[in-house]
Image (cartoon, rainbow, N blue to C red):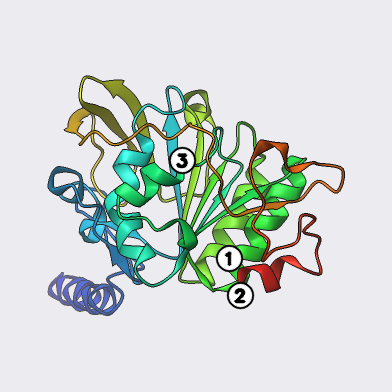
Amino acid sequence: MSYSASAFSSHAAAVQSVVSTLPHALWRANQMGSYQGLVTASGHALLDRELPNGGWPHATLIELLLHQAGCGEMRLLQPALAQIAQQRRIVLLQPPHLPQIAAWNSAGLPGEKLLWIKAARSTDALWSAEQVLRNGSCGALLVWQSQIRSEALRRLHLAAQASDTMLWMIRPLNAAHESSPSPLRLSLQPARNGVEIQLLKRKGPQHEQAFYLPLPAIIPEITPVAAPVIFLNPSASPHHGSLDRHTSSTARAGNLAPALG
């Protein structure tokens, strides 16, 4: 009996030793997990307390599931994006509205650091997202998709893990019941002067209750104002917005990477 107890004790010590050397790979469900890569503070102290490592993780897929577009998602992300825009470009892929450059500038997001990519098909959009992640010149990628297959999500998650680009996938709230490889999923509901957040999935203990996060007001984002744009539809005309003359109006597999450089 004493031998068994001793063996068990040695085994437990060995397991604990392994766990202590792999803090980012192993975590207990009742403890807050951590990420091995970089993290950017969200700019909202209440939210940072609920996120592993205290912020948005780089090199991983983050899902924002919205009750409706424009319910506060851009105000939520603005502080983190402003940090990234100081040094690197931000890509907006298939946003539901035209980027309002005056609003972005007033929020500390220079228009010259934004790249708007418009694709004719979902497959083109997902291909573009992979190219942005592999290119590595952009600091953040925001992708809006109403429907996406789980295999495509896994591909994007793997591509994100091989880069240091921050990746947000913005989807409708009804996608919450679908499986996802994302280690961090949040749902957003509009609330007076802010947003109601539900942590659907994170590396840490389950968060049962939604919480209210006040958000500062910014200029509306949907007024049609000129923005740098790449069209991925060869037949598309630039009537949706002015075209950045430094990029081609038709971005195919051969010329998207130079546009990102």
Indicate left or right for 157 with 77 as reference: right
Q: CA distance from mark 2 to mark 1?
A: 12 Å
Q: CA distance from mark 3 to mark 1?
A: 24 Å
The residue mark sitting in front, 2 or 1, is: 2
Q: Position of residue 259 (x, y in %)?
A: 67, 68
Residue 65 in the image: above or below residue 232: above
- Say which residue appears at 42% left-offset and 22% top-offset: 67
Q: Position of residue 177 (x, y in %)?
A: 50, 27
Would you name the residue on which mark 2 appears? 261
Q: Between residues 136 and 18, which one lies in front from this camera angle? A: 136
Residue 78 in the image: above or below residue 240: below
Label 3: which secondary element: loop
- Say which residue appears at 87% left-offset and 43% top-offset: 235
Label 1: which secondary element: helix
Label 2: which secondary element: loop
Q: Position of residue 55 (x, y in %)?
A: 25, 56
Q: Which mark is residue 119?
A: none
Position of the N terminus, as image quadrant, is bottom left
Give the image quarter of residue 218: top left
